[in-house]
Structure formats: structure tokens, C-alpha cells
């Protein structure tokens, strides 16, 4: 049989691994007692989550009058957090589905943790509109089901109803995609488990996976189909989120560029968050040979591209405001850059336009500490982007007598911290108990360099 | 009574070559067990392409129909409500949700069909012919009636492809 690939490519995992060492390296993490560093991270995350639970319970019992909203600024912190977290949730599926369709083999080391991150981020995101309803126990009213009130149905012409369907579908499909991808690895955990309890738990979770190639054959087909379905799905989700704004008649929101602008921004912020998390995981779990500098570099390049699209979108918005000749539109954008929220606007511009430009330099791209710091700036910048879009467009509307300012209350800030707590608590538990690198997929790219490397 | 002949390899290339050789020599291949989806093994085993793509398309059509007709029936037939003077049948506005239901039905339908068809279900016990197939072993299992099995030939082929271990197993065991 002919060699598959010649030995000119750089291997995707370093350190001369063989199949056995991959299993032991990845699952060794879950065998050992958690490190002190893990406990510190977990307890920090858990404290933030506790703060969030207290804040959310308080605002649900008291009502959302505990927020800083007013008649003019009816959407602010809460919806900012929602859009921010949905955006974070876009990188996982992009890595697992779109890079899979493009046959980007380097994705194998990072797709599992990126998908997990997606699911946790979408869970954080989903929490905010539900709280925003004020009566979250009525949240099921958003779904069309036969009821005793007529039946009174939901309004399918509303983008907010589209959002319900988009986010729920996205959460379900991402979770299924993630779990299906994990079944073979769960079987590996089952087969090397020492204790009876662990064997029983993972025996149940792995659904009796035996490694049968007849199953693998169909499994690969389904994996490809799911990737093909998830790729347009991920684009549709943030497109629909952008419709929440774009279909309204508010200057600053009412633009046709919103869907691509939001999708690019989502990938931009999602990749930044994946990098932040992976750099932590790589360092604390000593996975440098699996998540190599090349992986980090590739992701920073995606950030340069999507950061460029975001920059172009900011420029397009300003140009169209001027070119449309619409006074309201022009006022909104001048107000953004020079009004009372100019500080937020310039944080956004600084973090999102300037930060990615550093990644053009190989010295910076390959310096892990620098990459870590820069991704934090992008995370901050993308949170402010949503804040700027939402608050500055609302706070000075058509009628100057109804202009108002917005200041978040401590309850809103505690809820934001709580959502980070939820996200990191789930992520810390995940890296502790589950195979965080797709063992099967990494094994399949081990011979990527060429056949000669694997032969005796 | 049936007999199984279980051969283990330590890399994918020997497995694919040996499987091809077994099949060319008229052996009946029951299944192979591998730690990952080995490229080219489907051809060596003579597996037909999966029909799950068609199943997926079928579920997608069902999802699309439910999504479109459901919204039409609710908004235009069951209880039409005038919202901003928009037509009762606001078809373009129904497309985003119809797209989501299409993806949801296609995805879940395909995955459930896969699990049901391959028997990978909660509570199932794995079939095991040889250890370590989820770690670093590649195993192919041949099956034949006890009387007609050509053991010598199978052993010779296994040896020529650097098999690390082989053993025979009876159906009753």
C-alpha cells in the first residue's frame, strides 16, 4: 500500500507519542488526585457561582426593578451578557464542525474542550433572557404547545421567538455532537478503570461501545453529517441573535450588515475565550505536547481574520451613517464616539481593533504569556462591543426629553460574575472528570507525518 | 457450531493489509475492532457505504415540513391574529424557525438511528474478543463453521502481516 502522506509535514502532536502513551497521558489527568492549582481555580469559580446564585435568587424574588434599567434604556447589562455568552459559544462548533469539513487535522487536540466550552457558554447565555422575563417560572410559555388559553400561540413573526428556537436547537445539537464524539473515549476510560464504581459509571456512559469497525464506519458517516448540519446552524444562531436588533427601527441597530458582523464578532470572541482556557489547561495539566504552539498560532490567525471583519464592520457602520444622510443615524454614531458612553466605545475599539494586530508578529504569536494577555483584552473588548451597541443606541433616542443614562446596579454586576462562575465551575469539573482531549481522533492523526514513522 | 479466529495487530497498516489478504483468500470477516476509525479498512472489509445520509435527508424533510406547516397552521389557520398588519401567512418570517426545526430533526433523527442500528445504547455491555481494542490494539475477527475453517492458512496470513497475537474461540465460549 502506498504511503498516505510524505514525511515533510510537522507532526501534530510532539514528543514521539505512541497509541498507549496518548491514552495514558490524557486519562492520567483524571486518575491522579487533583492538584492544588485545580482546587484554587475550582473554589474561585465556585465562589463566583455562589455569588451569582444569591444575586439571581434575590432579583427573581424581588423583581427586575433591582436592575439599573429605566424606560429609555430597557435592555442593557442582561442582554449584553446574553449576546456575549452566545458569541463565546460559537468557537467550539466552528472548531469541531467547520474545521472538520475543511479537513483541518490540527483541530483534533482542541475540539473536545472547545465543544465543552460551547455548551457551557450557551447555558450561561440562556440564563439571561430567562431572568429578563421577570417571571422565569413561566419560561415555557415561549414554546408553542396546545394550552387552555385558547390555545393562544406565540408570535412566529418575532425575532425573539426565533431566538428561542435557535438557541435551544444549538444547545441540543452541540450537546449531542459533543457526546457522540466522546463515546469512544468513554469506552477507553471504562476499559482501563480500576475501581468497580468507575467501571460501572463509564460502562453506562459509553453505551456498550466495543470499537467495532462496522459501528465506526457508520459513526464516521454520522459525524460528517452532524458537522455538515452544525456548520450552517452556528452561522444561523448569531444571525438570528443579530435579528433581535436589526429588525427593529432603532438607529444604530437597523442595519443589514448585522448578521455577518455579529457572526464574525462571535467567532472572534469565541476563539479568544478558547485560547484563554486552553492556555490555562495546557499549562496546569501539562498538555504542551498535545496543544502545541502551532495550535495556538493557528487560532491567533483566525483571530486576525475575524478581527479584520469586525474592524471593517465598525467602519461600514460609520460610513453608512454618514452616507445615508439620515440625521438620527448620524447622531447615534457621533454620540457613540463622543457622547457620555465614549469611554466604553474607545475601550471596544482599542481592544478589538488594535489587539489582534499584534498577532501579525511571530514573536508575539509564539509567546504564550503574550497571547494569554492579548486574548483577555479581546474578551473585554467584545463584551464592551455588545454593551456599546445596546446601550448607546437606546439611551438617546428620537425624543430628547426621554434621553436617559444607564448605570448597572450591583445586582447586575454580581449576576455577570455569577455567569463566569457557572462557566468556569463546569469547565473545571469537565477537565477533571472527562477525557479533555479526543483520544481516538488524536490517535488517528498520529501517523500524520507519514507511514514510515510508525513502522518497526 | 461456529468458530472465531481472532488476530491482533499493533498498528493500523498491518490490520488493513491483513484484512484485505484474508478477504482475498475467501475468509469470512465478522468485524474488526479498532481504537479509532481506520482509514481504508471499510474497503478492505468490503463494507458498503452507509445509508445514513439518506436517513438524515428524510428527517430533514420531516423537520422542514413540520416547521413550515406548523407555523402556517398556528398563525393562519388555528387562531389568526393581526400583528402589525402583517399577512397571516408571513412565510418569509417563518423561515428561520423552519431552518432550526430542519436541523434539529435531521441531527437528532440521524443520531438516534445510528445508536439504534449499531446497538450502542445505554445499558448495553460491550462485545469483547480481545483486550485493549479501545487502547492500542487492532483486532480482526474471522468466522466460519467449525468443520470448514482453514486454520493453517489463517495462521500463515496472520504471521506474514506481523500479527502480535492470535487465538481461536468457539461460539459457545
Image (cartoon, coloured by chain):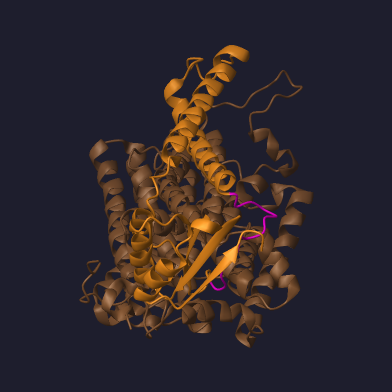
Chain colours: A brown, B orange
Residue B46 in view of the camera: yes
Depth check, front residue: A242 or B71: B71
Depth check, front residue: A296 or A403: A296
Residue B92 x, y percent position in the rendering: 42, 24
Depth check, front residue: A5 or A59: A5
Residue A365: name its quadrant: bottom left
Secondary structure mostly seen in magenta is: loop
At 34% from the left edge and 62% from the top edge, which residue is drawn? B21
The part of the chain drawn in magenta is B119-132
Residue A444 x, y percent position in the rendering: 39, 68
At 54% from the left edge and 66% from the top edge, which residue is drawn? A185
Residue A32 left/right relative to A293: right
Residue A338 in view of the camera: no
Q: Is residue A195 above or below residue A329?
A: below
Is residue A365 covered in magenta? no
Depth check, front residue: B8 or A221: B8
Residue A270 x, y percent position in the rendering: 44, 60
Residue B76 left/right relative to B51: right
Is residue B121 covered in magenta? yes
* Viewport quadrant of the N terminus of chain A: bottom left
Q: Residue furthest right?
A: A61
Q: Is residue A343 above or below residue A335?
A: below
Residue A62 left/right relative to B125: right
* Viewport quadrant of the C terminus of chain A: bottom left
Could you tell me how many numbered marks the image carries?
0
Q: Is residue A96 above or below residue A156?
A: below
Residue A142 x, y percent position in the rendering: 64, 34
Amino acid at each position: 500500500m502506498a504511503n498516505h502522506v510524505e514525511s515533510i509535514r510537522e507532526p501534530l502532536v510532539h514528543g514521539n507519542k505512541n497509541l498507549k502513551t496518548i491514552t495514558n497521558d490524557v486519562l492520567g489527568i483524571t486518575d491522579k488526585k487533583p492538584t492544588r492549582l485545580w482546587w484554587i481555580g475550582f473554589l474561585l469559580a465556585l465562589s463566583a457561582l455562589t455569588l451569582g446564585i444569591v444575586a439571581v435568587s434575590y432579583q427573581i424574588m424581588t423583581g427586575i426593578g433591582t436592575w439599573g434599567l429605566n424606560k429609555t434604556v430597557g435592555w442593557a447589562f442582561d442582554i449584553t451578557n446574553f449576546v456575549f455568552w452566545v458569541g463565546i459559544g460559537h468557537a467550539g462548533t466552528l472548531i469541531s464542525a467547520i474545521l472538520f469539513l475543511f479537513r483541518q487535522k490540527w483541530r483534533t487536540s482542541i475540539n473536545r474542550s472547545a465543544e465543552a466550552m460551547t455548551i457551557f457558554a450557551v447555558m450561561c447565555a440562556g440564563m439571561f433572557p430567562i431572568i429578563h422575563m421577570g417571571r422565569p417560572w413561566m419560561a415555557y410559555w415561549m414554546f408553542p404547545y396546545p394550552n387552555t388559553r385558547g390555545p393562544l400561540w406565540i408570535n412566529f413573526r418575532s425575532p425573539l421567538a426565533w431566538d428561542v428556537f435557535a438557541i435551544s436547537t444549538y444547545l441540543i445539537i452541540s450537546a449531542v455532537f459533543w457526546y457522540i464524539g466522546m463515546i469512544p473515549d468513554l469506552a477507553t476510560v471504562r476499559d482501563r478503570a480500576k475501581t468497580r464504581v468507575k467501571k460501572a459509571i463509564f460502562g453506562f456512559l459509553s453505551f456498550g461501545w466495543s470499537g467495532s469497525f462496522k459501528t465506526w464506519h457508520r459513526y464516521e458517516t454520522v459525524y460528517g453529517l452532524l458537522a455538515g448540519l452544525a456548520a450552517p446552524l452556528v452561522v444561523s444562531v448569531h444571525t438570528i441573535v443579530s435579528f433581535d436588533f436589526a429588525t427593529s427601527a432603532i438607529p444604530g441597530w437597523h442595519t443589514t450588515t448585522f448578521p455577518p458582523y455579529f457572526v464574525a464578532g462571535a467567532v472572534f470572541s469565541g476563539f479568544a475565550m478558547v485560547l484563554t482556557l486552553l492556555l490555562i489547561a495546557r499549562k496546569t495539566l501539562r498538555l504542551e505536547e498535545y496543544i502545541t504552539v502551532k495550535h495556538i498560532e493557528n487560532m491567533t490567525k483566525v483571530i486576525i481574520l475575524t478581527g479584520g471583519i469586525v474592524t471593517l464592520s465598525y467602519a461600514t457602520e460609520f460610513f453608512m451613517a454618514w452616507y445615508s444622510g439620515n440625521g438620527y443615524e448620524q447622531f447615534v454614531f457621533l454620540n457613540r464616539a463622543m457622547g457620555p458612553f465614549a469611554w466604553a466605545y474607545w475601550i471596544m475599539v482599542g481592544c478589538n481593533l488594535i489587539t489582534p494586530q499584534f498577532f501579525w508578529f511571530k514573536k508575539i504569536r509564539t509567546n504564550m504569556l503574550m497571547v494569554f494577555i492579548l486574548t483577555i483584552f479581546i474578551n473585554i473588548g467584545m463584551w464592551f462591543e455588545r454593551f456599546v451597541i445596546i446601550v448607546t443606541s437606546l439611551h438617546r433616542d428620537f425624543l430628547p426629553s426621554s434621553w436617559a443614562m444607564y448605570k448597572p446596579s450591583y445586582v447586575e454586576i454580581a449576576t455577570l460574575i455569577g455567569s463566569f462562575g457557572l462557566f468556569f465551575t463546569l469547565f473545571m469539573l469537565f477537565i477533571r472528570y472527562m477525557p479533555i482531549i479526543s483520544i481516538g481522533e488524536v490517535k488517528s492523526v498520529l501517523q500524520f507525518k507519514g507511514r514510515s514513522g510508525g513502522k518497526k | 457450531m461456529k468458530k472465531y479466529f481472532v488476530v491482533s495487530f499493533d498498528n493500523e497498516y498491518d490490520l488493513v493489509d491483513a484484512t484485505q489478504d484474508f478477504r482475498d483468500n475467501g475468509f469470512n470477516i465478522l468485524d474488526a475492532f479498532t481504537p479509532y476509525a481506520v482509514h481504508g479498512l471499510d474497503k478492505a472489509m468490503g463494507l458498503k457505504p452507509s445509508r445514513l445520509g439518506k436517513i438524515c435527508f428524510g428527517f430533514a424533510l420531516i423537520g422542514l415540513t413540520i416547521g413550515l406547516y406548523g407555523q402556517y397552521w398556528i398563525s393562519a389557520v388555528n387562531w389568526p391574529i393581526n400583528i402589525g398588519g402583517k399577512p397571516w401567512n408571513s412565510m418569509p418570517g417563518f423561515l428561520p424557525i423552519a431552518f432550526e426545526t430542519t436541523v434539529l430533526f435531521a441531527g437528532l433523527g440521524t443520531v438516534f438511528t445510528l445508536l439504534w442500528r449499531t446497538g450502542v445504547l445505554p445499558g448495553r455491555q460491550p462485545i469483547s474478543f480481545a483486550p485493549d481494542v479501545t487502547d492500542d490494539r487492532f483486532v480482526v475477527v474471522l468466522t466460519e463453521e467449525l468443520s470448514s475453517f482453514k486454520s493453517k492458512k489463517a495462521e500463515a496470513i496472520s504471521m506474514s502481516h506481523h500479527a502480535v497475537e492470535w487465538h481461536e474461540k468457539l461460539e459457545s465460549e
